[in-house]
Image (cartoon, coloured by chain):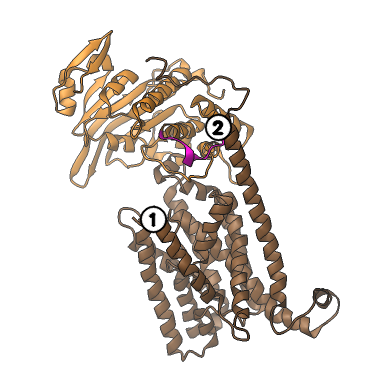
Chain colours: A orange, B brown
Amino acid sequence: MQIDMTNTITEQKPAMEVKGLSFAYGSNKVLQNISLQIEKGKITTIMGANGCGKSTLFSLMTRNLNPGKGKVLLHGKNIQSMKLMDMAKKVSIVHQYNSAMDDITVEKLVSYGRTPYMKLMATESEEDKQIIDWALEVTNLNKYRDREVGKLSGGQRQRVWIAMALAQNTKILFLDEPTTYLDIRYQIEILELIKKLNRDYKITIIMVLHDINQAIHFSDHVIGLSEGKVIVEGRPSEVISTESIQKLYGIRLNVATVEGQKFVLTV
Amino acid sequence: MNEKTISEETGFQIQPDEGQLQDRDRKHRRVMRATISFVVVILALIILFFAAINIGSLQVSFGELLQGLFVKYNENVATIWDLRFPRIIISMLAGAAIAVSGVLFQAVLKNPLADPGIIGISSGASFAAVLITAFAPSLYFFTPLVAFLGGVVAFFLVYCLSWKGGLSPLRIILTGVAVNALFTGLASAFNSMSGGDMSGVASIVEANITQKTWGDVVTLFPYVAAGLILAVLFIGECNLLTLEDKTARSLGINVNTTRIVISLVAVLLASIATAIAGAISFLGLIVPHIGRILVGSDHKVLVPFSALAGALTFLLADTLGRTIAAPYEVSAAVIMSVIGGPFFILLLRRSTKYAN
């Protein structure tokens, strides 16, 4: 196992910080002066209605957009001033939409996750191989390692993208709507996998989820956006209520509590 | 969660199951197919090389050839050495360069239909070469460099003009066709204006490699070698460019810079081949396409295979061109167009991916 466990005694520094972040497409202000902290070793979910700015926030935090104002800090350092390669060793990202050559094998695709560690013209080291094996093992893909990516089901393919991100061996993992396009069975499978990564390997997870109940159940912390502002923030069991859902999504829904768990009745 | 929703825990597996064995079998077969393809192409290239030496009005036996080359002077062998060897070597170098250029363009533009000929890079290079041959023949030595600049201009035009919040495969082809027409027209116009009898201009425009000498080989070789070495160095990046841009970026790759650098290598390969052998269409499309079927999409094997198969294809086209209507010659470019046109249409019709 290549994951370094020494960091598990949490220092109280946040893994990532967002400070005074604003962003606009032309005159359309998408994010307005957002500040938040991502706690180390936790699962944080960004939620909100369509167009609330959650995708923009995700893009800014993963450096696919440049902020108009404010900054995103990773371990206290502005990500804008980091080299892409260095950032790729600290943060891995599973994007919502992915594509690859159909005839590439699962193992080969996962090995691309080692890119940030590769020297020019170098071949895979023993360490690279071990981490790739570990990534395949954790995502339950070991028996598909020789299969072509084009022959996988949607759920398996999503696990391959997660395995590729894991091969980057980072402490922080971003996922953009990791359950879209999947059947409910695979949705739960992916979310369970994410929970396992967080629990067993102490990976800090930051994701965007569409489904309110999945966000409540699989997160330690939720950040609810509306009109480019943080409206709701905290432990889901504390902050989710009929009122907060109404503020976020503009619709009144009942919230039931079953065996101590909150459920938003979405019908 | 009940047990059904939790994914099966990975037990330590001693026996691989059926699916795994099938996967390994398929993988094994892919490796075999790739190996056989390489062997066949290399053998075919060697055989064709010796056949091409001996095809034409002058013929020598293999023994005579070796003797004439290495032991003692033989007039026939000397003539073949001066006339046929250069064009054969130029065919192979140009073929390899154009095919690899095609692979690189396809990776950079995420478009399996990109071909340096079709998208106008070759004609841009060709026009620049015509200009320098017509107006500054004393700078003949710099033709490859000028052709490269012409290729860069053409690529810049295609890239910018087809950019509309993204690159649609079909839009690139359409823009490329227009850019291609423009430069081909300009080159023909200059050829006509110069009376059509300036053999240097005409030979570039008509892709005629009959008159090529060892001097041309010497001009072409270092550029092709440099281009191919650079292409090999960027194999890993080419593979990563097949992912979504955002994904490649999250792996630490600066996608835009990588794209520009690989494009320049592709333009270099296409332009220098054009400067010496003329504009060739479809070669950079057909060879990589067949390569993907035979050896797979991994650039680690696709690039070297395309270089070999490109050399073979171009040499075959040239040899065919000087045999089918001997003593008249049909240029390799014409042969490639006649074969490549229908092939391109077939690709367009078969693919659901590119055309909607």
Q: Which chain is indicated by disc 1?
A: B
Residue density around tag 2, few if under 14, some if 14–19, many if 20 or more, within 10 Å: few
Please give left or right for residue B22 compared with residue A53 in the image: right
Chain for mark 2? B
Q: Find numbered disc 1 in the image and state the secondary structure of the residue it sits on.
A: loop
Q: Secondary structure at mark 2?
A: helix
Decide: few, some or many residues near mark 1? Use Cα within 10 Å; few <14, some 14-19, many ≥20: some
**Of the two numbered discs 2 and 1 in the rendering, the one whose residue sits closer to the viewer:** 2
Q: Quadrant of the N terminus of chain A?
A: top right
Residue A149 located within the stretch drawn in magenta: yes
- Depth check, front residue: B248 or A91: B248
Give the Cα separation between the discs numbered 2 and 1: 32 Å
Q: Position of residue B63 (x, y in %)?
A: 83, 74
Residue B215 visible somewhere in the drawing: yes
Q: Amino acid at mark 1?
A: Tyr
Q: Which mark is residue B179?
A: none
Furthest toward the front, the residue is B18
Question: Residue A50 vs residue B184: left or right?
Answer: left
Which residue is the site of mark 2?
Answer: B19
Near-viewer residue (B45 or B114): B45
> Which residue range is magenta in the image?
A144-154
The answer to whether marks 2 and 1 mark residues whose Cβ atoms lie closer than 8 Å is: no
Q: Earlier in the sequence, mark 2 or mark 1?
A: 2
Q: Which residue is mark 1?
A: B354
Question: Is residue B133 located in the magenta-colored stretch of the structure?
Answer: no
Instruction: Give me the residue at 66% from left, 52% from top.
Output: B36
Q: Nearer the viewer, residue A177 or B331?
A: B331
At label 2, which amino acid type do we have? Answer: Gly
Residue at left offset 59%, top offset 54%:
B232
